[in-house]
Image (cartoon, helix red, strand yellow):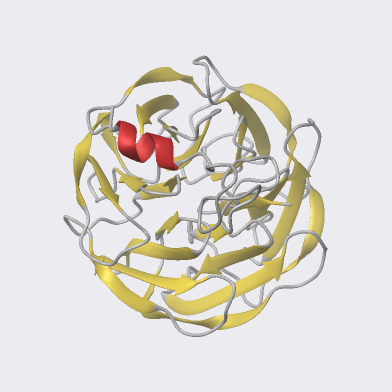
């Protein structure tokens, strides 16, 4: 294990600065990264692709209506937060460059943030609680990455390139120091890539999934925010697998979803991850499931989306 980076994930008490003091600028009140929180945002909560929904991750139950996005954004997959503000990039039936944002602790409609540096659908997200961005995309397939500073508004800037051009890579899997992308392509790939959101530059090879696929989605957490979990996949894949974010290597089996599903929205409070919507034909796609990140095992029922779920959704969490 990379112990230097591992230690950086916990605040140093009594010091000031980025990770010091009682609560560093990127640390939530509970001691975890600010991009994890108790309220889960499930985006594209309905077939129109313009809905924001929310859940309380520690409980079980159906999602509740939050508000509307500025446009319909099916097929995004790219959302993240700094704990207080949620942000989502692009998507839609045709490529779009719009970025939306909203305040997680309230309910209401999203507002315009700015524009991505490229127009795309099926992006993956990365974040470190201060910066967030999107990677890859599917129409046409690209390898671009761009980023914003979450607490501001404005247009995204170029970050670098993925190792290859991938349609619908799985993202939303990160800690303070490293973000991961998995799979992608068309046909699917097994590659896992990583990068540091605090810098700019190209992604590097991490390892491989147990299966080649795309439209998989990730999440991360456990007590030390070291585990990344990837779920589902195109087409008809119910596999859940995991990695240790700070250690490069291949993924291992975690368990299975209750149904085959691809293009889900995911959110986490650091302990529990919720997996919502996605696509499975035939069958209902408004399910919400959950897993406990620090363990391994199959998904359990959480509730249902307020609307009929749609594939290509996105998720994030905060307080």
Residue displayed at 67% across by 41% down: 286
Residue displayed at 38% across by 49% down: 177
Position of 227 relative to 147 (above/below): above
Q: In which quarter of the image is residue 70?
A: bottom right
Given residues 146 and 225, the one toward you in this image is 225
Q: Quadrant of residue 111?
A: bottom right
Instruction: List x then y, in percent, for residue 275.
Output: 59, 37
Instruction: List x then y, in percent, for residue 73.
Output: 56, 68
Instruction: List x then y, in percent, for residue 223.
Output: 55, 28
Instruction: List x then y, in percent, for residue 290.
Output: 63, 28
Left or right: residue 282 versus residue 262 is right
Residue at the extreme front? 14
Left or right: residue 20 versus residue 207 is right
Q: Which quarter of the image is occupied by the N terminus? A: top left
Given residues 299 and 27, the one toward you in this image is 27
Position of 151 relative to 48 (above/below): below
Q: Is residue 226 visible?
A: yes
Residue displayed at 40% across by 30% down: 237
Q: Is residue 231 visible?
A: no
Left or right: residue 232 versus residue 146 is right
Given residues 262 and 131, the one toward you in this image is 131
Position of 113 relative to 315 (above/below): below
Q: Quadrant of residue 118?
A: bottom left
Residue displayed at 37% across by 59% down: 197
Number of marks present in the image shown = 0
């Amino acid at each position: 294990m990379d112990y230097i980076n591992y230690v950086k994930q916990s605040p140093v008490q009594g010091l000031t600065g980025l990770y010091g003091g009682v609560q560093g600028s990127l640390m939530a009140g509970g001691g975890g990264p600010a991009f994890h929180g108790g309220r889960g945002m499930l985006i594209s909560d309905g077939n129109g692709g313009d809905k924001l929904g929310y859940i309380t991750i520690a409980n079980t139950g159906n999602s509740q209506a939050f508000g509307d996005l500025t446009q319909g954004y099916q097929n995004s997959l790219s959302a993240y937060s700094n704990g207080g503000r949620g942000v989502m990039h692009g998507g839609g039936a045709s490529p779009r460059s719009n970025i939306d944002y909203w305040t997680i602790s309230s309910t209401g409609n999203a507002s315009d943030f700015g524009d991505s540096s490229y127009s795309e659908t099926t992006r993956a997200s990365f974040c470190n609680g201060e910066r967030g961005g999107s990677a890859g995309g599917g129409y046409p397939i690209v390898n671009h990455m761009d980023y914003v500073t979450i607490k501001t508004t404005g247009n995204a800037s170029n970050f670098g390139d993925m190792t290859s051009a991938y349609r619908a890579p799985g993202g939303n899997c990160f800690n303070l120091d490293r973000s991961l992308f998995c799979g992608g392509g068309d046909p699917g790939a097994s590659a896992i890539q990583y990068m540091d959101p605090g810098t700019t530059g190209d992604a590097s090879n991490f390892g491989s999934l147990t299966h080649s696929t795309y439209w998989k989605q990730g999440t991360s957490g456990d007590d030390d925010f070291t585990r990344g979990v990837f779920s589902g996949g195109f087409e008809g894949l119910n596999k859940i697998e995991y990695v240790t974010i700070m250690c490069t290597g291949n993924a291992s089996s975690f368990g299975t979803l209750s149904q085959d599903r691809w293009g889900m929205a995911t959110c986490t409070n650091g302990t529990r991850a919720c997996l919502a919507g996605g696509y499975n034909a035939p069958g209902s796609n408004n399910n919400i499931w959950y897993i406990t990140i620090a363990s391994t095992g199959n998904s359990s029922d959480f509730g249902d989306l307020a609307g009929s779920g749609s594939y290509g959704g996105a998720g994030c969490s905060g307080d």
